[in-house]
């Protein structure tokens, strides 16, 4: 085994969470931050997600946290020194039933309280705003002005470059195989045939976060959950905004390459741990898409793929110190990881460096289930206790 | 105006008229749209995504055989039968196909259009200029408008078939496997079966096997006919008899209109009586003489035959004008390649792949057998000792060898990372054949074997299924157990 490496902070996971956290820690003065990742760059959920970003939810906790993240998104290109392609092209949450119309009413009230730029779209405006949709199906729409899309290839490139420019060491294809403990502290991570000693460890390992926690002998209240997405062949702009069809558990947008990218959830699905694609989701997503946007019927599907979320019982992230160890921090449990990453990295780095935990982050504490304090999100109907998240949680 | 090619003696005589960009054209009875256009001298049909380089029917790279037909964008002209009065429109030109100012992109240094150009520092995101820029990119990349509602069709009810055996591929090996089997057999073929496989076999002709799921379930559809039902086939056993494809050499000009693979050239000349060119060079591996003889036997003027590994460039500005092989310049207006022969790996990959961090090729499952040419080992990619950076690794998305080298020099050797950095293989072909070229380049640079370098994940359904067809399968698929 090679000589041990010494870092101030070791982050396990080089996805959007790990890279942005590493950048923020270095920016706040951490001298030696090392990121270790088992896979390849953009190989996990950070390279497979729907790229949708929004701040407005219906619960105060979700809205406060994700709206903070959206504000970070708006300034992210400037901070990272590279264009992250965040496009605040508007995020439409579309309701097609009485039930979801009520969800939108609640959300609108929450947005007013938190100063989120959102508005109910009058039916008369729909033909101009969303010309390709079947307007007769739509009961209510909320338009989040600062919401939009951020293609992962741009932000992952910018985050990695910015972190490395600040002196962060980033290693891919370097799986952490062991976490050595002394009492309530982790002292070393074993990866790539060498020890990585550090004062502090962070789990930012996406769907594999619970596995990494188990290496240290502790648990996280979330498990991997496969979801599927697909992309069409390109066409000229047809759909401008990011779209969530909350009755259909479906989300989509059209990329700058002209492809319509999105996915759907099957209600009542159980957690699956792999990234193979199946024949089950594609027909259902296709049906939702064709019903709402009839012109796509003759468009061909170019590729389908899948990736894994890491949903906790309430679908919200797990952000903060791990209750069972003194120097283990966590940013995991992500279902809305791309939307929440800049906010989580900002608040978590602040907490690690200053010791002060922001209340917006405290709501998503790692031990909240133990304390009986889940953060239910009314706009996200949880299908069962095994954490099936609905698509409004996947944008 | 392009000169029509004189049809070969055996070409069908009956004329069929159609319109290209509003102009009246004629083809012959039994033509595909692509054959009719090729015969009419229209070899340039499409463009690459960024350089706007001309592309044509090639058998290898889809950018050259897609067009809007009867209002439906990106139709595969090489699969679509020509019918009287068909309205065909080329895509991706601006403002008009006749006056295409986008061709100016060919003058830009290639480096300016390397992946990443779409998010320059100069245009900060969030700014109104950024929204305009992004919309312009999407408009250019889209190439064509979506079909109007009245033309798009809707959900096409799907079919589900249970079978003891499904055979994919209608060549001699596929037909033999289907004929020899007992029980309920389904044969899926892009064209028509090479021989009648027997009455116990249900033949899905003109269908593409677009996804092979784990457990053996196969999805097939007719990609050129969005009104035809998609089919899900549950089969106890699967036989892959998909044959082999010829991969063009990794040299500059290999994607020019006028470069055809042997299968496409033989179909053009044999079935439609359209010669690949007035003077044709045949390159390839062992089969090149056989292919040259067959072409000559059909009346095609073959001017040279040489080893694909000796080729260093295909010459020409907008179309093929010649070939450079062993330092010798050969004048020709078409190049037909017959090897190196490789297998389209997509279906086998999908059936076997698994993983959590990366989908990787696993062992073929027990219910899957590969027969015929598809079971032969792949021949090495033809690439000269001195690689030329101007060669395209991915001609549809404009990824040059120089761009791949740029990343290799920076230590990026993982094919999945190279795919994400360059967009290589993200076009209509979804990596077939360009990921084979990518693997060969990485292998050459790193000293690893192409097999060890591997490939990115081969995704289904590769444009062979529309949303309307896919939606029709919802009733045939229960939720995953």
Image (tube, grey):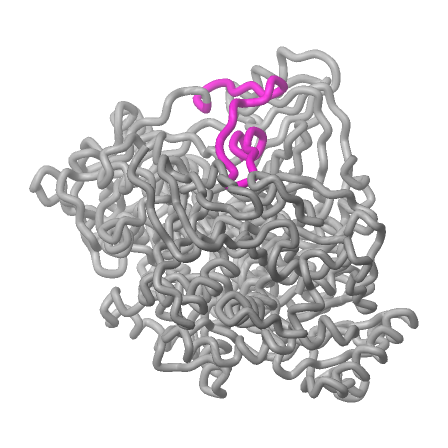
Furthest-right residue in view? A98
Spot occupied by residue B230 in the image (x, y as percentages of width and height): 70, 43
Question: In which quadrant of the rendered view does residue A245 lie?
Answer: bottom right
Asked whether residue A40 is drawn in magenta, I would say no
**Image quadrant for the N terminus of chain B?**
bottom left
Spot occupied by residue A25 in the image (x, y as percentages of width and height): 44, 66
Relative to B215, residue B357 above or below? below
Q: Relative to residue B92, is residue B155 drawn left or right? A: right
How many numbered marks have been drawn onto this rendered protein structure? 0
Q: Relative to residue A382, is residue B54 drawn left or right? A: left
Q: Relative to residue A380, is residue B28 drawn left or right? A: left
Residue B66 or residue B429, whichever sits in front: B429
Furthest-left residue in view? B327
Q: Which residues are magenta?
A: B347-374
Residue B245 or residue A379, whichever sits in front: A379
Spot occupied by residue B161 in the image (x, y as percentages of width and height): 76, 31
Residue B194 or residue B472, whichever sits in front: B472
Relative to A115, residue A341 above or below? above
Residue at 76% across, 45% down: B473
Residue B454 or residue A375, whichever sits in front: A375
Q: Is residue B87 visible?
A: yes
Q: Is residue B64 visible?
A: no
Residue at 41% across, 60% down: B46
Relative to B291, residue B313 above or below? below
Q: Relative to residue B386, is residue A65 drawn left or right? A: right
Asked whether residue B372 is drawn in magenta, I would say yes
Spot occupied by residue A329 in the image (x, y as percentages of width and height): 56, 56
């Amino acid at each position: 085994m090679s000589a041990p490496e010494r870092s101030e902070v070791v982050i396990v996971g080089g996805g959007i969470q790990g890279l942005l956290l590493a950048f923020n820690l270095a920016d706040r003065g951490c001298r030696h931050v090392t990121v270790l990742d088992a896979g390849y760059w953009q190989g996990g959920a950070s390279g497979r997600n729907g790229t949708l970003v929004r701040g407005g939810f219906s619960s105060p906790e979700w809205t406060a946290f994700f709206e903070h993240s959206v504000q970070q998104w708006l300034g992210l290109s400037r901070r990272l020194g590279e264009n992250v392609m965040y496009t605040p092209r508007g995020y439409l949450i579309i309701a097609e039933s009485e039930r979801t119309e009520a969800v939108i009413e609640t959300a609108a009230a929450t947005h007013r309280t938190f100063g989120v730029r959102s508005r109910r779209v009058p039916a008369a405006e729909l033909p101009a705003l969303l010309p390709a949709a079947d307007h007769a199906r739509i009961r209510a729409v909320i338009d989040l002005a600062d919401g939009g899309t951020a293609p992962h290839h741009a932000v992952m490139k910018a985050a990695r470059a910015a972190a490395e420019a600040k002196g962060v060491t980033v290693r891919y294809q370097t799986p952490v195989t062991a976490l050595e403990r002394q009492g309530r502290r982790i002292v070393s991570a074993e990866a790539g045939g060498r020890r990585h000693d550090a004062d502090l460890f962070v789990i930012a390992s996406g769907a594999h976060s619970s596995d990494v926690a188990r290496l240290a002998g502790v648990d996280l209240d979330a498990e991997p959950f496969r979801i599927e997405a697909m992309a069409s062949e390109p066409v000229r702009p047809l759909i401008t905004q990011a779209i969530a069809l909350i009755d259909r558990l479906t989300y989509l947008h059209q990329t700058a390459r002209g492809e319509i990218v999105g996915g759907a959830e099957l209600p009542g699905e159980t957690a699956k741990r792999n990234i193979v694609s199946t024949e089950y989701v594609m027909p259902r997503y296709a049906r939702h898409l064709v019903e709402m946007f009839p012109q796509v019927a003759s468009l061909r599907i170019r590729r389908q793929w899948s990736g894994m979320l890491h949903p906790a019982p309430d679908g919200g992230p797990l952000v903060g110190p791990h209750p069972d160890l003194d120097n283990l921090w966590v940013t995991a449990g992500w279902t809305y990881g791309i939307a929440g990453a800049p906010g989580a990295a900002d608040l978590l780095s602040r907490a690690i460096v200053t010791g002060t935990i922001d209340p917006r982050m405290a709501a998503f504490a790692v031990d909240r289930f133990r304390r009986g304090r889940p953060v239910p999100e009314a706009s996200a109907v949880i299908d069962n206790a095994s954490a099936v998240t609905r698509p409004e949680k996947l944008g | 105006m392009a000169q029509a090619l004189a049809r070969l003696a055996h070409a069908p005589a009956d004329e069929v008229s159609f319109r290209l960009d509003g102009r009246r054209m004629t083809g012959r009875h039994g033509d595909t749209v692509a054959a009719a256009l090729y015969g009419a001298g229209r070899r340039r049909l499409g463009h690459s995504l960024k350089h706007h380089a001309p592309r044509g029917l090639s058998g290898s790279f889809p950018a050259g055989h897609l067009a809007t037909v009867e209002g439906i964008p990106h139709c595969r002209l090489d699969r679509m039968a020509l019918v009287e009065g068909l309205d065909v429109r080329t895509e991706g030109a601006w403002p008009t196909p006749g006056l295409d100012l986008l061709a100016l992109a060919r003058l830009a240094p290639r480096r300016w259009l390397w992946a990443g150009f779409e998010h320059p520092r100069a245009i900060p995101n969030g700014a109104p200029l950024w929204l305009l820029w992004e919309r312009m990119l999407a408009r250019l990349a889209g190439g064509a408008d979506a079909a109007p509602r009245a033309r798009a069709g809707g959900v096409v009810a799907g079919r589900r078939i249970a079978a003891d055996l499904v055979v994919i591929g209608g060549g001699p090996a596929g037909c033999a496997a289907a004929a020899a089997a007992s029980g309920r057999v389904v044969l899926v073929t892009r064209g028509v079966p090479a021989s009648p496989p027997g009455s116990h076999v249900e033949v899905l002709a003109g269908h593409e096997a677009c996804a092979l799921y784990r457990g053996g379930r196969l999805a097939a559809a007719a990609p050129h006919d969005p009104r035809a039902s998609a089919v899900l086939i549950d089969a106890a056993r699967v036989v892959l008899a998909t044959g082999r494809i010829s991969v063009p050499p990794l040299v500059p000009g290999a994607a020019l209109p006028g470069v055809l693979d042997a299968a496409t050239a033989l179909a053009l000349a044999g079935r439609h009586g359209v010669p690949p060119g007035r003077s044709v060079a045949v390159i390839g591996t062992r089969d090149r003489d056989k292919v040259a003889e067959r072409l000559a036997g059909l009346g095609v003027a073959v001017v040279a035959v040489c080893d694909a590994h000796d080729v260093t460039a295909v010459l020409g500005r907008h179309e093929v004008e010649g070939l450079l092989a062993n330092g010798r310049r050969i004048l020709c207006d078409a190049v037909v390649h017959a090897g190196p022969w490789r297998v389209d790996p997509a279906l086998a990959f999908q059936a076997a792949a698994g993983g959590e961090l990366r989908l990787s090729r696993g062992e073929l499952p027990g219910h899957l057998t590969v027969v015929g040419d598809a079971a032969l080992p792949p021949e090495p990619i033809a690439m000269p000792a001195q690689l030329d950076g101007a060669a395209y690794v991915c001609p549809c998305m404009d990824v040059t060898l120089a761009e791949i080298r740029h990343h290799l020099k920076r230590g990026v050797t993982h094919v999945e990372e190279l795919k994400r950095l360059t967009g290589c293989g993200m076009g209509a072909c979804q990596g077939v054949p360009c990921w084979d070229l990518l693997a060969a380049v990485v292998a050459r640079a790193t000293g690893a074997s192409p097999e060890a370098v591997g490939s990115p994940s081969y995704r289904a359904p590769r444009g062979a299924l529309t949303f309307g067809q896919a939606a029709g399968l919802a009733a045939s698929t229960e939720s995953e157990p």
